[in-house]
Every structure is written in C-alpha cells, then in structure tokens.
Image (tube, grey):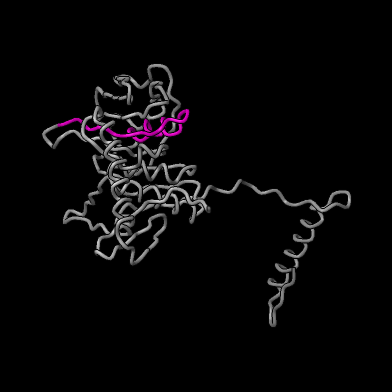
Amino acid sequence: MVCLYRMVSKSRILKCNLLIKKTKKMNQNNFVSGMPQMPQESKESEPKIAKLSVNDFAEKIGIQPDQQGRVTFAPEHDRLAYEYAEKFARDNKAERVIIDGIASPGVIASFLHGMHPAEGYLTYMSKDAEGKMTKGETKVLEPLPQGEGQGPEGFTWVKKETEDYTLVEFNLAGDFKIEDLDKVIPPDVNPAKPVLISGRGPLYLTHTIAAGYRHYKGIPGVGFYQPASKFGPAKTEVGVSHNEELPLGLNFGEPSEIGTAKELHEKRIKEGLSEIKKGKIVSVETNDKIIKFTLDSGETYSLSVREVTKE
C-alpha cells in the first residue's frame, strides 16, 4: 500500500504508517511455509432475487387495468405467462422470484412453472397487531404428496378419482394461518392423470398444493376448479402442463368436461392448419415462441411453437 500527500500533518503520517504496518502483517499471515493462503470469505454469497411485476406482464401483452386498477386475465394468457416468467428468470439469473401482484390461478401457476427451478414467492396482505394491513412475502413450498394427505387442525381433504382426472379438494374450518403452510401435505394420486384442485383459501396455499403435484412422477398437468356459484358458472383451467394434449390455458366448465375440451382443442388446431394451407401466406412474423401468419384474405393465425427440428 502507498500513501501520497503533498502536505500532511504528523498525525496523518502516523495513521498512514500504522496502516502500512498492519497491511504488511496481514500479508505475512497469509503465507504459511512459503505458500500463499487465500483469505476465507466470512459468509456465502446471497441468492439472486428478482421481483416479477404482474402489472408489467399485463402491459407487455397489451392488457390495461380497469378503473379500480385490477387486471383481468384470460386462459389464453397462461402460455404467455409461462414464457414471460421463463425468460424473466433466465435473463435475471434469478434463484428466487417474487411475484408481485394479483392474477388468476392459471396465470400464477404458469409463472411459477415457467421460472422453475428458481424458487417462487407470492406477496400477500395481512393485518398486524394494530389491525393495519401490511404486505408480506412467502415462499411457495413443494410438498411431496403422501397417503391421504395431511394438514393443520381443521384442515381436511376430499379426493375423487375418475378415468380422466383426479379432483383434489381442500376445506378449511376457519382462517388459514401462514405459519401452518409447512404442515400441508397433499394426498397421493395416480400420476398418469391430471390433477384438478378446488378449495377456497389464500393464493399461497392453493399454489403450494399445486406445486406439490407440478413435478410429481410425470403427472401430465395441474388445473384449478371453481364450482358454480352466485358469481358465475363452474370454471376449470389448466395452469401446469407437461402434455401437448393438455395445453396451458385449456378451459372448460365441470371437471367431467375435460375429455370434450381436449377433443375440441385438437379439432381447432387441425382446422386452423387446414385454413393456413388453403390460403396464400403474404407475411410471417415471429415473436418469442409465437409465429404469426397473415393470409392474402387478411386473416391472421398465430402458432405456438414448443419445439423446432431441422429436417
């Protein structure tokens, strides 16, 4: 180390000399038996954390919030959410991603699936001791399904197995406490069929259950079922997919309609490809994994690409 001063006081010179002596002593201590020793780091590096804004995603795909600031997503946005989160986590080299904002269960599940293996966190609102609303963050766990399932006191499971799917419903006796999240273990299921989750509870609970099935023994997909109520008809939407026959955003009414929904999906694909073949393509645009074809008739078709092979 070198200290340079044009005009220095005696005290400054003393400080400089002391610093030089201290530095020399440290350098000597870093040599043992003539071999240089690297100083040990005091602590391990912290994981890279990034915050994914739901509103930023909505703006990216052209959705504007309403007068109350709420954003309404549709099933066709699930695929876009997956690709957005996948790119977001990769570009930010994130090991943990905090999803900040409110969205449909399908979009949130697609975010969490796309950013994997980065750990997912959700924001939530709660009341403090003074009754004031505060914003917190909690990790979405990935509990391994076991037996008939487990949970804290007052938490129950209902499982219904059918030929085409497994319906897993959870019920709460009262308000769910966030400190009980690690006590939630989903019931075991047949991994050859998709799982549909139903129940009313905080988002971090619903998505912890979904995450438990997300990579469970090659399960084809996970969806969310909302029974009919005064707020509207029954709705089911696939938010995690590992099978092209069960695409992200596949939606229908009652769970029993899943077979018909898959058939209609395949029919729409075939009809769309047939229309493209019949027309004359005047332009082709690509955006991430979407290819947009415009025909001479003025009609446009968008194709989602999952794999590209060179022939």
Q: What stretch of residues is rendered in magenta?
A: 205-228
Task: State the residue at coordinates (46%, 51%).
Answer: 89
User: Vertically, is 180 above or below 154?
Assistant: below
Residue 112 relative to residue 101: left or right: right
Q: Nearer the viewer, residue 294 or 54?
A: 294
Q: Position of residue 186 (x, y in %)?
A: 38, 24
Q: Nearer the viewer, residue 82 or 303?
A: 303
User: Vertically, is 245 above or below 82?
Assistant: above
Q: Is residue 145 magenta?
A: no
Count the labels in the image: 0
Q: Position of residue 251 (x, y in %)?
A: 26, 39
Task: State the residue at coordinates (45%, 29%).
Answer: 216
Task: State the residue at coordinates (33%, 63%).
Answer: 281
The quadrant holding residue 237 is top left
Q: Residue furthest front?
A: 278
Q: Is residue 127 visible?
A: no
Q: Position of residue 56 (x, y in %)?
A: 33, 57
User: Vertically, is 161 above or below 8?
Assistant: above
Q: Residue furthest right?
A: 33
Q: Is residue 94 visible?
A: yes
Q: Residue furthest bottom?
A: 6
